[in-house]
Amino acid sequence: MEEYKRNDYWNGLEEYNNTPQYQEGKSKEFKEDLPLEDALSEESLGVKANRRDFLKIFGFGLTAAALAACETPVKKAIPFVVKPDTVTPGVANWYASTCQSCAAGCGILVKTREGRPIKVEGNPSSPFSKGGVCATGQASVLNLYDSTRMQKPSSPWADLDAAVASAVAGGGKVVVLTPRINSPVSLKIIKDFLAQAGSSAHVQYSPAGIDAIALAHQNNFGSAVTPTYKFQNADVVVSFGADFLGTWISPVEFTKGYSSKRKVNPENPKMSKHYQFESIFSLTGSNADLRIPVDAGQDGAALLSLYNLIAAKAGQSPVSGVNTPAGAAEGLKAAADSLWSAKGHSLVVSGSNNVAMQEVVNAINSLLGNYGKTIDMDTPSNQAGANYGDMVKLVSEMNAGGVATLIMVDVNPVYNYHDSATFAAGLAKVKNVVALSYRVDETAALATIKAPINHSMESWDVLEPKKGHYSIVQPTVRPLFDTRQWQESLLAWTKDASSTKMLDACKAWFTSALYNGAGSTKAFWEKAVKEGGYSGSMAPMSVMDAHEEMHEEDAAEVAEGNSAGFDIAAAAAAIGGAKDGKAIVVYQKVGVLDGHHANNPHIMELPDPMTKVCWDNFVTIPYTMAKAESIIDGDLMKVAAGGYEVTLPAVVLPAQAANTVGICVGYGRTAGGRVINNIGKNAYPFAVAAGNQRSYTVTEGVSVSKTGEKMTLAKTQYYTGYDLRDEGGVAGGVSGLKNIESRIDNFIVKDTTLDQYKEKKYAGNENRAGILHENSLTLWKTHKKKGYHWGMSVDLNSCTGCSACVVSCHTENNVPMVGKKEVATRRDMHWMRIDRYFKGNPDAMDGSLQVAHQPLMCQHCDNAPCETVCPVLATVHSDEGLNQQVYNRCVGTRYCANNCPYKVRRFNWFSYYSNDKFNSDERNAPNGHMFDSVGSLVLNPDVVIRARGVMEKCSMCVQRIQEGKLKAKVARKALEDGAIKTACQQSCPADAIVFGDLNDPESAISKHFSNERFYHALEEVKTLPTVGYMTKIRNNNTPEWHKMSEATTTNTEV
Amino acid sequence: MSYESPIREPLVTGGKGYHDITEGVLAPLEKKPNMTWLAAFGLSAMVMTMGVSLIIWTFFEGIGAWGLNKTIGWAFDITNFVFWVGIGHAGTLISAILLLFRQTWRNSINRAAEAMTIFAVICAALFPLIHMGRPWVGAFWVLPLPNTRGSLWVNFNSPLLWDVFAISTYFSVSLVFWYLGLIPDLASIRDRAKNKIAKAIYGALSMGWNGSTRTWHRYEIVSLILAGLATPLVLSVHTIVSFDFATSIVPGWHTTIFPPYFVAGAIFSGFGMVQTLMVVTRKVYKLENFITLSHMDAMAKIVILTGSLVGIAYATEFFIAWYSGNTYEQYAFINRMFGPYWWSYWAMISCNVITPQLFWFKKVRENMLLTFIISIFVNIGMWFERFVIIATSLARDFMPANWALYTPTYVEVGIFIGTFGVFFTFFFLFAKFLPVVNMFEVKTLVKDDTVVDHGHHDDHGDQHSHSAEAGVSHSH
């Protein structure tokens, strides 16, 4: 009897004991002999059946055979044997969590369907973001399903853990390199882990962070904090290159605050004033009342000039030797006057990462009495970025051979450190390189031990984006792959960790540090998890304190050299004189940000709000330079500085400072994933460390030259209004241009100034009465809307063009991404787009150039031109006023799209989910997620994937409307106004979009429709849309006006 | 025999008798194809194969294989459709309207012109079918067929649906009319055929035509009725095609002048194409005595007339755009002249309005080389007219942010060229197997005294042949 292997399953004692009977039976397929002989015997084969039986059997056989030929559908749905309480098929679950796309830490709600996260929305109860999420956050859900993630550790977890343990035990300095950590729990875990090593350090590294603000506050006020900027309290905002609505520190929070001051109340019309002095054209600059282009080499001079102007008003002595940039003098004066008249409720910010500059900003804000009002130092923000000097120090230490073990957590310095060669050289001298990384990126590829980490939607954490405000990161799905949250890896590597589970660590920290004694600790924790965060009692040690502790030595150094207070002369000296030559500004683009999460087609195909370019980075060329050197969009430019050069296509922007070009970071990846690899060029090496800070401007030794070659750019909008030679060119010279400009002014984007609006509420909208009168005659039967009549309004005054709505729409509606080549063929599938129009002279340097952003989705016309022309009735009007597209019925004549004056209809030119073009590396796999079994989990099951050859368009989120109506019905209540929010509306950080029932006279949308500012785009075409716009109200944008108006400006109370 | 004014040029020259006509017209049918025909047919068939392959590729890949985009949803496809439909019009005009007006000069060219109509409509009908995203369902969903989808029906408001009816009616009436006219000639061929297979086929096709007076009588009545039915079609088909544009709201499309403008343009382009074909056919098949210089002269005059009508239509459009005060309309026309597609506009003007004016000179009208060249210009110009209307209007419509440009891909260009392959393949087959000149109608134009002698011409024909030939004399 052979020895039985105990680690196999056994089937009964016979098998276990391996009895002879069992052995005999095992060799036979059938235990007993089959009665074949009986069956085949003569009697049984003998025909006994009569004719009727024969016919019966024959008939049955025939039918059975025929039925067997019919194809039965194979249904693979497997029902729950025991249904989890929390999962109801078809019903979404929402989990409160925190967005980790950048350090801002906006509160989010993650929508899960059947256990998989499919959509990110803002958490309205989040104290700062208040329901908004930016484009990057909206897209982050797709990063979860990125099939090019590192899916398993480089060696089995047990081996890997042992390897790290022996590395740490091997002696020498252990360094943990992380991005900016806002989590007190994670900081504690790192600290506990490092405590095991003899010599150790925790270094934080933000490749595109802003650390100068904290250091300036250290110098001026003695505490290294980045304060909370309260744009909601600021009546006058002056920004020196800070793109606070797009990418700077906490754009969603700032947009919320800023837009609350830009909404015009008809009863008491007032609006904050916004001055922007910047070199490149930022999204924030496009929203400014007065935007004065100032070259990057002169922003210090401009800032000091403003200081002098304010100091003069405050009776302080000015700084000597300041040469005010010529073009900015008037604007600065106007800004100074406005600021002074709004003392205590104004705000000056600067995007510079130069400590001296930020000190001047602090001095101005201090003179204006803004501290404590619009600048809250008591609620320091942890959102700005880590101290770059630490990283510089680490790199030199590595090169000196002082680091034995380097554990890198989700950082990629080989790609984004300014001197990546030195970093890589240093890395080679580190004995043990451990990468805790989301993918095998440029840096992780060089590590000996690679441990995959979780997406934030698979992780637990407690963040503290601002002191005293805790935001919880909650997993919404089990890890998709064999990955481990990096904190859990560290816990596993900490010998005496009480638990290796992050949930335990979070719970333990949360209940011990924050528990306020009310209710049980369990209830306390669960309530916080449910709500997504907690604000109230303070932990004994905040993240801020922990960070300060890490920099104790530095702080002591600084304190010795510079006690609290302002030394403007020293700051001015540090800033130095204005530099005249060409300059490069390295900036972050909306969506892509620092590039960390950019391996995501939703981000890559998001048009840049200013240039409308997708899938590429480029060099923005000022219009004046373009004119002088005859550069047009797509000309390849060689940009060189400091021994580094890149060749990138030009994109010409009007009213950009004459000598400054801009290049955004995040591109030029070689191991960033198949979506982003080999697109664009890396701009990080331009941003070198100046002292301990990273400087995002290069003002010396810059050369910009044409190479003579061209490159195709993929844009979603070609019309610029100024470049008549380009593809968006206007025919007919000046008269043609006038025609187009008056068309935009009168029928597309209506705008006015606040002064005019104060005089008459319908200012800018004067022609509407006439249009309505002319439109009152009709031959058409009007549609009856008995129940609901859905309508939407977009306030052009609030809309900043941040593009969060665009990505939100795409993720909600499974909009296919088509890649650079197809976008360049003008076949983007965007259901929602934001049109950008410039107004004024493109070479104006006096701030007279203005910008309007106009979100456009299907206008759901009552007289829909698309509906009449469809031969097969594939697009029809619902009795709730929606223009519906019936995909199944569509035959794809495209007549509807031709006849749509708004051009919001999108045709499925290809089978985007099955044509391999859209999953090819050659095209950067624009729609790859629809091809693989993991990526397609992100698709919203409520919205069908459209087949090739059919037309699609905005449905006004009809699935959400249906859901809202059903919920109200189940609850036996009338549908509340605002209960249904479309995806674009929900995501809007500026609350610019209102949606609701026009049949309810009390609804917000009905009030918008009767507002004097309300109009429809192209109204005189009489399409009778149910989507409309509110006129854009601007403060007058000439410096003269700003000077004159000061006398009449009334200080408004905060 | 119809009355000929003594000073008028004879419509058939060379002193031909009935038998000469039969011999002359049927010579290409009854002989083995020559190398020229084989080469021309082979080339056409190759081009057709290429076009069909590219259509199959389009079905396989999607409309994305073309250069269209979110702003310009129609360009080459519908341009080609209107172009081919327009070409068809001359055939119907010649066969129907000129028949009703008793313009007997049409007798020698109507057969080829009608054949051209049918082949052109086949080419035209291809485009609405293949331009659809899902032709496999579109092909029958656009038909008002009873179905199981409840109240789901076609949209009678849509000009595209009107197109379906207009084109299908036009095609079927043209086909019946053409075939009816062929029957007496088919009978002649049957009677002369020596090959058994040919005899059987032509016999079947001629539907037992016996040339009796009763048959002729019925023939005349039916052809008059069909001419009456076809006549409004000449006007209606292109009117309805123009509705595809006129009833839309796209600036540059939304114009009430479109129906007459399109009809004039269609006749213009159709005669251009007839000229092109006739110049070649009469030369290759040595039919100079049947398709005489006076025929070519008459057609050239129609080309001047319709070309000038089209020119006036262009001018009117511009005037109305300015006069209407409609900013979109005004810009659409500025853009046509000076926008990114300016070259297509000026190509249209020079080919359609300027070049045909050369036909004012009789020397030009009688110079076949010049006629051929000008007719090619007309064809090109009329293609560009449709391209200008369709693509450039869409390229610059209401919202500047939507503006886009369009570049055709090789697939679209290939399909367009392929339709010429289709057209000429059919045309060469037609020229090989069917009489390109309507023999019995041409016979009405000549006076043949020998016909009295019954036995004289009967050396290779039989009783039927004789009666078929003699049958024409009933109109004496």
Image: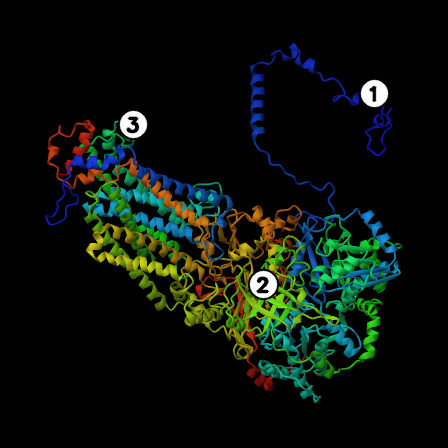
Q: Please name the amino acid that badge 1 sits on.
A: Gln
Does dot 2 land on a helix, a strand or a loop?
A: strand
Res B102 visible: no
Marks 1 and 2: in contact by CB < 8 Å? no
Residue linked to disc 1: A21
- In front of the other: label 3 or label 1? 3
Residue drawn at (30%, 44%) of the image: B116
Marks 3 and 2: in contact by CB < 8 Å? no
Disc 3/disc 1 C-alpha distance (Å): 84 Å
User: Where does residue A1006 sit, x and y in percent of width and height?
Assistant: 56, 66
User: Where does residue A581 sit, x and y in percent of width and height?
Assistant: 61, 75
Residue drawn at (30%, 27%) of the image: B197
Disc 2/disc 3 C-alpha distance (Å): 74 Å
- Outermost top residue: A42
- Please tell me how crowded label 2 is: few (under 14), some (14-19), or many (20+) other residues with Cα within 10 Å: many
User: Where does residue B432 sit, x and y in percent of width and height?
Assistant: 29, 36
Residue linked to disc 3: B200
Q: Earlier in the sequence, mark 2 or mark 1?
A: 1
Circle 1 marks a residue in which chain? Answer: A
How was this image coloured? rainbow
Asked whether, in this view, residue A524 is left or right of residue B316, the answer is right
In the picture, which quadrant includes the N terminus of chain A?
A: top right
Res A110 visible: yes
Does dot 1 land on a helix, a strand or a loop?
A: helix
Residue linked to disc 2: A648
- Please tell me how crowded label 1 is: few (under 14), some (14-19), or many (20+) other residues with Cα within 10 Å: few
Query: Same chain for the residues at labels 2 and 3, yes or no?
Result: no
Q: Compare residues B146 and A918 and report the one nearer the observer.
A: A918
